[in-house]
């Protein structure tokens, strides 16, 4: 066969291989698009169902938030205490922060007060994680493990936000006589309160990061390529 004939045959073979590769790539893109759309659809449905304004959801979340926070922050800083109590509104928890040394003989005590919306503090971040994990395109065993690990981390994140809020409550109520922050400590507390405790969106960004961390592995993001067969 002449050199021109061999060149033409080689050109045709490479063209056919390129067409096959492009076809597989288009098929993979279509499959990835379907997977993404199905994930988005399932996550939106689950989140919507769990976020419906049922008092059953909010009431149990208020009890859970109050008990967990009360366990961690019942005794607060040096000689202080924090009480979490239910209110008439199922989405709201009342906070009293005081110092034992100021307790009167009759048991009463002046306290700094605040109200937290348990729906935004704990419930919304929790159901966001649940909807993302349960909708993820990974095996069910990995989903369940990721859900358990994610719920633990989200709970710790919620407690961190509550801790910052309590520190700020005691900081602005100077009459409580708690040790106050100064210098860099005061700046860090102000920053944390502004961007974490006082912001509802920051917590959701952290929840998305937790979802990615506990659900996926590095190899899930690697593009799998097939070896091209070069005809001889």
Image (cartoon, rainbow, N blue to C red):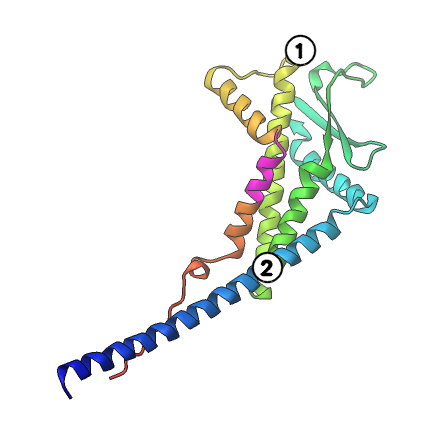
Q: Position of residue 152 (x, y in %)?
A: 60, 47
1 or 2: tag closer to the N-terminus: 2
Q: Position of residue 221 (x, y in %)?
A: 44, 58
* Separation of marks 1 and 2 at Cα, in angstroms: 55 Å
Q: Which residue is mark 2?
A: 37
Q: Secondary structure at mark 2?
A: helix
- Range shown magenta: 199-207
Q: Residue furthest left?
A: 3
Residue 144 visible? The answer is no
Q: Is residue 203 magenta?
A: yes
Q: Residue at x 39, y 70 (%)?
A: 22
Q: Which residue is mark 1?
A: 175
Q: Position of residue 228 (x, y in %)?
A: 32, 75
Q: Residue furthest bottom?
A: 1
Which numbered circle lies on residue 69?
none
Q: Residue 91 vs residue 47: left or right?
A: right
Q: Residue at x 82, y 46 (%)?
A: 56
Callout 1: 10 Å neighbours few (<14), some, many (20+)? few
Q: Residue at x 64, y 48 (%)?
A: 128
Is 218 or 95 nearer to us in this picture? 218
The answer to whether 105 is drawn above or below residue 225 in the figure is above
Q: Magenta stretch: dominant SS?
A: helix
Q: Is residue 155 magenta?
A: no
Is 104 or 149 nearer to us in this picture? 149
Is 188 or 12 nearer to us in this picture? 12
Q: Residue furthest top?
A: 175
């Amino acid at each position: 066969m002449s050199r021109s004939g061999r060149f033409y045959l080689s050109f045709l073979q490479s063209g056919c291989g390129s067409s096959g590769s492009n076809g597989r790539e288009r098929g993979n893109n279509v499959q990835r698009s379907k997977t993404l759309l199905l994930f988005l659809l399932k996550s939106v449905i689950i989140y919507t169902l769990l976020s419906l304004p049922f008092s059953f959801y909010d009431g149990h979340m208020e009890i859970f938030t109050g008990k967990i926070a009360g366990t961690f922050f019942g005794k607060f800083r040096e000689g202080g205490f924090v009480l979490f109590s239910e209110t008439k509104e199922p989405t709201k928890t009342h906070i009293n922060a005081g110092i034992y040394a100021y307790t009167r003989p009759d048991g009463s005590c002046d306290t700094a007060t605040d109200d937290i919306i348990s729906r935004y503090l704990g419930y919304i971040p929790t159901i966001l994680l649940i909807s993302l994990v349960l909708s993820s395109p990974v095996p069910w065993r990995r989903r369940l493990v990721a859900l358990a690990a994610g719920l633990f981390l989200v709970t710790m994140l919620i407690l961190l936000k509550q801790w910052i809020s309590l520190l700020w409550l005691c900081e602005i109520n100077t009459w409580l006589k708690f040790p106050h922050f100064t210098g860099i400590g005061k700046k860090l507390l102000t920053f944390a309160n502004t961007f974490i405790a006082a912001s509802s969106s920051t917590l959701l960004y952290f929840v998305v990061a937790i979802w990615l961390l506990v659900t996926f592995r590095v190899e899930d993001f690697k593009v799998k390529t097939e070896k091209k067969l070069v005809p001889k």
